[in-house]
Amino acid sequence: MILDVDRQERIPNNVDLSSDWRLRRALESWQPKFLDWWKTQGPAHFGRNEIYLRTAVNPRATDWARYGHVRMPEYRWGIFLAPAEKGRTISCGDDAGKPVWHEVPGDRRNLIRRLIVTQADCEPASVEQQRQLGASAPSLYDLRSLCQINVEEARHLWSMVYLLHRYFGRDGREEAHDLLARQSGHEETPRLLDAFNQPCADWLSFFCFTCFTDRDAAFQLGALAESGFDPLSRTARFMLQEEAYHLSVGERGIERILRRSAQLTRLDPNGDARAQGGIDLPTLQKYINHWFAYCVDLFGSEVSSNAALYFAAGLKGRWDEALRYDDHVAVKTTVGVAHIENDAIVGREVPLRMAMNELLRRDYAADCRRVVGQWNDALAHEGSDFRIKLPHLRFYRRQGLYSGHYFDPDGHVISRCEWKRRRNDWLPTDADRAFVQQLMVPCLEPGQMANWIAAPSRGIGDAGIDFEYVRIP
Ligand code: BYC
Ligand code: FE
Ligand code: FE
């Protein structure tokens, strides 16, 4: 009998590794390289401590993870695909409606590989970016969140490396090797996408990252879950299950900082949160501007022939493609996309398939606006008049139609001169970063929080806020 989930194996999995000795050997020889990467590029602190972590054990809807104290290097990283859906068909593009592929179609090999490699590259990148954060955790509760997210991003890497090894032979093995060789922020061998080469050196950045960058992951994985290459779809679907928690860490983290900042502003005779050892609300807004803009770039160009190819080939769909749309071929309609001509904003109609990146970005932005709405409710609840505002999609872009032009946070065209004059009002300055950095002192007593952040409303599962999430002897 073939076990659904094999947990006794060196690599826990539900892909029947035990019956494919070549694949198993290839992955087992990648494993020590992965562990070496984890040691040298992964979390620099608390590697020996027992941490209350969730471990994925079975890709079903409920009861899919176990919780318990484990040391991170001993974490059981597994390869799990969501259960196959019987009779699933290709959800978009030229082959919409035909049965999905269980092997890689030869003519789509390069496209699929590029999608998987791009997705895969982000996972270890994020762990590298967050490497030093453990040293300045604002609480044990938050330290545990960081470690949880790090081990799960590493599991996402495992999932992608499985796909590369299983379906791409020698090329796949080389790509898997390169995934551990590139390094976030490295001058010669950086990570593939810009946001993953940005420093994430303080906890305000961490919460912005998990709110906005992990949300990009959720939307990209949603689009990949629509893939006609079924193993990719199933992998993405299971990763999405873990991703929900990452987003909540970011959303709730920022909300806790906002609440605390509002309280400290009120407390100070001059309304200065900084004087009270907190982060002032305008600085928070600047960090949000920075990270939102970088994450908006992650969707690629507004008009993209790559995106059209992915869609046409049935490899990447729209958000909720199957549920939200009737026309899955998408060759008859157009989408309005603002272009910049002679410093003026001009609306143009673009063939729908060419605008797939932009559609996903708009869905992403709508979700971000929903979150900002909740933050503003929290600010109102604290009696603050300050409101967070998401910058316009054109603000501070380095990819796509708006890069090389200047816009204010409302999306109006401005001159380079004006940009230089106002930039420090809109984006964190070196002084802002230095200020935030010096607030980052560890607070590791169970139940205690650093001064600049409010306590969470509740703990993890049944555990209280004062639970010993990380055992520190
Ligand atoms: N930075 O037609 P274009 C995650 C490149 S996050 C640098 O505009 P395309 C995670 C692009 O690669 C989710 N380069 O774009 C989060 C192309 O280069 P080549 C990650 C960029 O291809 C937190 C050129 O510009 N998953 O998992 O339609 C923690 C022109 O391309 C950027 C995915 O992204 C950029 N921002 O779309 C842990 C899904 N943007 O090929 C993990 C897979 C574009 O001409 N990736 N370029 O050399 C994709 O679907 C697409 O590659 C993209 C780009 C949406 C990223
Ligand atoms: Fe991930
Ligand atoms: Fe994530």
Image (cartoon, rainbow, N blue to C red):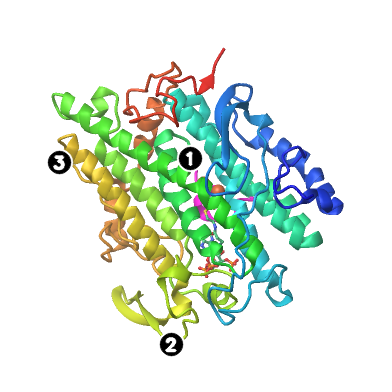
Q: Which residues are magenta?
A: 188-200
Q: Locate residue 145, reporting x and y percent.
A: 48, 33
Q: Residues within 10 Å of mark 1 (few under 14, many from 20)?
A: many
Q: Mark 2–mark 1 contact, CB under 8 Å?
A: no
- Left/right of residue 243 with respect to residue 408 in the rendered view: right
Tell me the residue at 41%/28% (across/down): 459
Tell me the residue at 54%/33% (across/down): 147
Tell me the residue at 26%/28% (across/down): 274
Disc 3 element:
loop
Q: Mark 2–mark 3 contact, CB under 8 Å?
A: no
- Membership of 420 in magenta stretch: no
Residue at the front extreme?
1
Disc 1 element:
loop
Q: Establish if 53 lies above or below 314.
A: above
Q: Locate residue 248, reporting x and y percent.
A: 41, 42
State the CA–CA distance, disc 2 to disc 1: 43 Å
Q: What residue is pinned by disc 1?
A: 200
Instruction: Give the mark, 1 or 3, whose residue is nearer the N terminus.
Output: 1
Instruction: Give the mark, 2 or 3, whose residue is nearer the N terminus.
Output: 2
Tell me the residue at 82%/44% (across/down): 29
Residue at the bottom extreme?
332
Q: Is the CB of mark 1 within 8 Å of ligand 1?
A: no
Answer yes or no: is residue 26 visible. Answer: no
Residue type at mark 2: give it: Lys
- Left/right of residue 340 with respect to residue 113 in the rendered view: left
Q: Locate residue 18, reporting x and y percent.
A: 81, 48
Magenta stretch: dominant SS? Answer: loop
Front residue of 113 and 348: 113
Q: Locate residue 205, reporting x and y percent.
A: 42, 40
